[in-house]
């Protein structure tokens, strides 16, 4: 049984805690939190031992009826591996804490690549994490790009990737975030951090990324052009290749899903926890081949696509299951593969009787 501690219990931390709890080979030792608030109450209601980051605030937790199991130091000592899901930059500061206890750690994509020995995606380089003590799961957009690049690179070879990332302005609970009524180049300089980040997984890949932020909390949306070295005969071959990927959903035209909002609505209807969508959602109609240029658009749920990657990173770093075994166990326990759509035929609306 792998004993896992979560340091930083926010958007990513609470989802990883739930995912770890669902694994038959893992035990959640507890979660560490800074402030006594509704999220702390939720952790205790979920039955997770709660540890405090700042010892002087223990009484504040007790005042709102939250039992404290100990300090973050104790959590790190008790854990075989820690998932650090603290805000960008704090993870790097925490590395000395993990070193002091000789506890391996998984960091998140908000940290620089230098925080860990390996930047990680379960589909791309699971085996590289096996000898590491410190691993970084790449950011949500980078995870989404890498899941798309991996099968295309293997099947056709890639000459060049150009991707425009329309990034959600903030998460639903980030009330202080903007933009409110704007579309903001972010960053205005090119490339955004995502291209170099994808290269931490694919060092030889030629990729340019451009980012901008828009006022939505739903999902990120990517518009992507990949120049293939050996393009297939038809774009249906690409659709079939992408449909066969474990953490990809092809969104068919007949489902009439016209945007990120409808995807989120479907996830809620399907009863997914928090309306999460762990998979890349690629609009089937957007997959277009013009000579060797492939185009497509995909939506990435920023709050959840890295969650299965964290679970696999935990197994990779502890070395007790192979990549395929870990991915398949993670997919099965979380329910990855979207209810109604995952196993449906790839089919265009114009081949059906239009009733609309
Ligand atoms: N939210 C997103 O869309 C995604 C975030 N990430 C990355 O995941 C990491 C965490 O991001 P979020 O979960 O969004 O942040 P968040 O702000 O929702 O959660 C971070 C939590 O850590 C706590 N915290 C702050 N300082 C701490 C400390 N010293 N020790 C322990 N806990 C501390 C905060 O109070 C908060 O509860 C970042 O590196 C981010 O870039 C990666 C993919 C997607
Ligand atoms: O990892 C993320 O995005 P990113 O891949 O654009 O860095 C998350 O959506 C967090 O992004 P944020 O830095 O806008 O909070």
Image (spheres, rainbow, N blue to C red):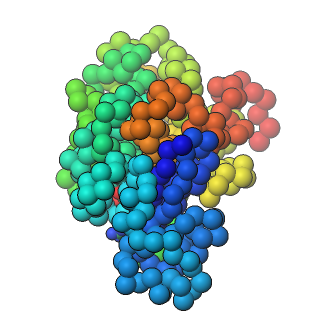
Q: Is residue 228 above or below residue 4?
A: above
Q: Nearer the viewer, residue 228 or 335?
A: 335
**Whole-percent x, y for residue 145 in the image:** 39, 38
Which of the four quarters of the rendered structure image does ligand 2 lie in?
Answer: bottom left
| Residue drawn 43% across the image and 54% down it | 79
Q: Nearer the viewer, residue 80 or 200?
A: 80
**Whole-percent x, y for residue 190 in the image:** 21, 48
| Residue drawn 59% across the image and 34% down it | 329
| Residue drawn 43% across the image and 62% down it | 75
Number of labels in the image equals 0
Q: Nearer the viewer, residue 257 or 172?
A: 172
**Whole-percent x, y for residue 7 in the image:** 41, 62
Q: Nearer the viewer, residue 106 or 268?
A: 106
| Residue drawn 38% across the image and 58% down it | 77
In the rendered image, the quadrant that contains the C terminus is top right
Q: Is residue 65 above or below residue 232?
A: below
In the rendered image, the quadrant that contains the N terminus is top right
Q: Quadrant of residue 198?
A: top left
- Locate residue 188 relative to residue 308 in the image: left or right: left
């Amino acid at each position: 049984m792998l004993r896992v501690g979560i340091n930083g219990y926010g958007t990513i931390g609470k989802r990883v805690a739930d995912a770890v709890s669902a694994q038959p080979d893992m035990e959640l030792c507890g979660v560490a939190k800074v402030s006594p608030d509704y999220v702390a109450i939720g952790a205790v209601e979920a039955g997770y031992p709660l540890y405090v980051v700042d010892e002087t605030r223990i009484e504040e937790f007790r005042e709102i009826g939250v039992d404290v199991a100990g300090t973050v130091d104790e959590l790190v000592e008790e854990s075989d591996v820690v998932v650090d899901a603290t805000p960008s930059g704090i993870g790097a500061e925490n590395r000395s804490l993990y070193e002091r206890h000789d506890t391996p750690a998984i960091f998140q994509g908000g940290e620089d690549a230098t925080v860990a020995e390996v930047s990680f995606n379960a589909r791309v380089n699971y085996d590289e994490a096996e000898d590491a003590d410190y691993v970084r799961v790449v950011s949500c957009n980078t995870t989404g790009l890498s899941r798309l690049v991996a099968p295309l690179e293997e099947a056709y070879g890639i000459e060049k990737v150009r991707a425009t990332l329309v990034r959600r302005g903030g998460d639903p609970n980030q009330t202080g975030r903007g933009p409110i009524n704007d579309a903001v180049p972010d960053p205005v300089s090119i490339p955004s951090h995502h291209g170099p980040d994808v290269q931490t997984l694919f060092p030889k890949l030629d990729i340019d990324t451009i980012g901008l932020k828009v006022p939505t909390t739903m999902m990120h949306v990517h518009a992507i052009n990949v120049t293939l070295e050996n393009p297939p005969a038809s774009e249906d071959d690409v659709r079939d290749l992408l449909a066969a990927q474990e953490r990809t959903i092809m969104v068919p035209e007949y489902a009439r899903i016209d945007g990120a909002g409808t995807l989120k609505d479907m996830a809620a209807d399907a009863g997914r926890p928090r309306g999460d969508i762990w998979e890349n959602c690629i609009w089937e109609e957007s997959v277009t081949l013009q000579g060797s240029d492939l185009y497509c658009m995909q939506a990435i749920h920023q709050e959840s696509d890295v969650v299965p990657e964290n679970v696999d990173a935990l197994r990779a770093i502890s070395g007790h299951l192979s990549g395929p075994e870990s991915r398949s166990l993670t997919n099965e326990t979380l329910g990855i593969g979207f209810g109604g759509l995952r196993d449906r035929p790839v089919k265009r609306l114009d081949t059906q009787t239009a009733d609309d």
